[in-house]
Amino acid sequence: MWTNVFRIGGLHNVSWFQFLPCEAELSPASDTTSSRAEQNDVATYLVLSSHLRLQKEGFLTTWTNSFVGPWDPSQGLYNPDEKIKLWLFLPGRHSSITDKAQAAVSKLRVVASGIWVAPGDSEEISVAFSQSLRNCIERALTGLSYMRFGDVFSKFSPQSEDYLRRGQPTVEFIFAATEEAVFVHVIVSAKNVRALSSGDAERLLRSSVKNSSYRLPVIVSPHGMRGSLTGFCPNDLVKQVYF
């Protein structure tokens, strides 16, 4: 394992903006469950499409769940609603969005904004800022054949499945901020974190026949949501449905 700490310049003061879809872009409100679900789908599409456009332009962006209050334990730890919101971070002090970013968020509205000053006093903003930095790193590492699994970036090689079962080079980035600057702790090691293969699907099928409760633990890229693989879809069916 190799580890080191680096200082990131130019991020002591960062302007942040939160976005949600403009009401005019959503279909008229209705009491039916299907209409509300359709509205949520449209809202999610608008946020994610703006996020991808800003990412292509090189901006620091991410998306998170919207939060509702007061906190209700029955809704889970974070109590999210069904909407997601977009975050845009601009190094320095900005009272408004730059012209270059405006076109990508034309169908969204600013719901909150402010200045983040290291080390920061809001956990929610700090988490979103760290996530946007990882998104930036992900763009840089994609060209070097690294795939993202949560906070871990693993080297991908189109070799045999036996090769993939060995520990692969992985990189983890841990961000910290002080009154002086923002720092990133880089940890390089070998882990058995890899993409799913056809052999995994076959083993899942065989195991589920013997034990119906068997579930294969997985991490869903890019934000590291943990879950269990419960089934899979053949490639030919995917092509028929989507293409």
Image (cartoon, helix red, strand yellow):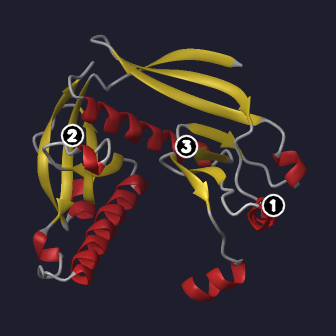
Density class for disc 1 (Cα within 10 Å; few <14, some 14-19, many ≥20) is: few
Q: Are marks 2 and 3 in contact (CB under 8 Å)?
A: no
Name the residue: 26% across, 35% down. 124
Amino acid at pointer 3: Ala
- Amino acid type assigned to the residue bearing label 2 in the image: Trp
Q: Determine the image quadrant of residue 35.
A: bottom left
Q: In this rendered view, identify the residue nearer to me: 16 or 101.
A: 16
Badge 3 local density, few (<14 within 10 Å), some, or many (20+)? few
The residue singled out by tag 3 in the image is 140
> For mark 1, what is the residue?
203
- Residue 51 percent across, percent down from the top left: 35, 57
Mark 3 vs mark 1, CA separation in Å: 34 Å
Q: Secondary structure at mark 2?
A: strand
- The foreground one among 195 and 79 is 79
Of the residues tagged 3 and 1, which is closer to the observer?
1
- Label 2 vs label 1, nearer the camera: 1
Instruction: Calculate the distance from the C-alpha at mark 2 to the C-alpha at mark 3.
Output: 22 Å
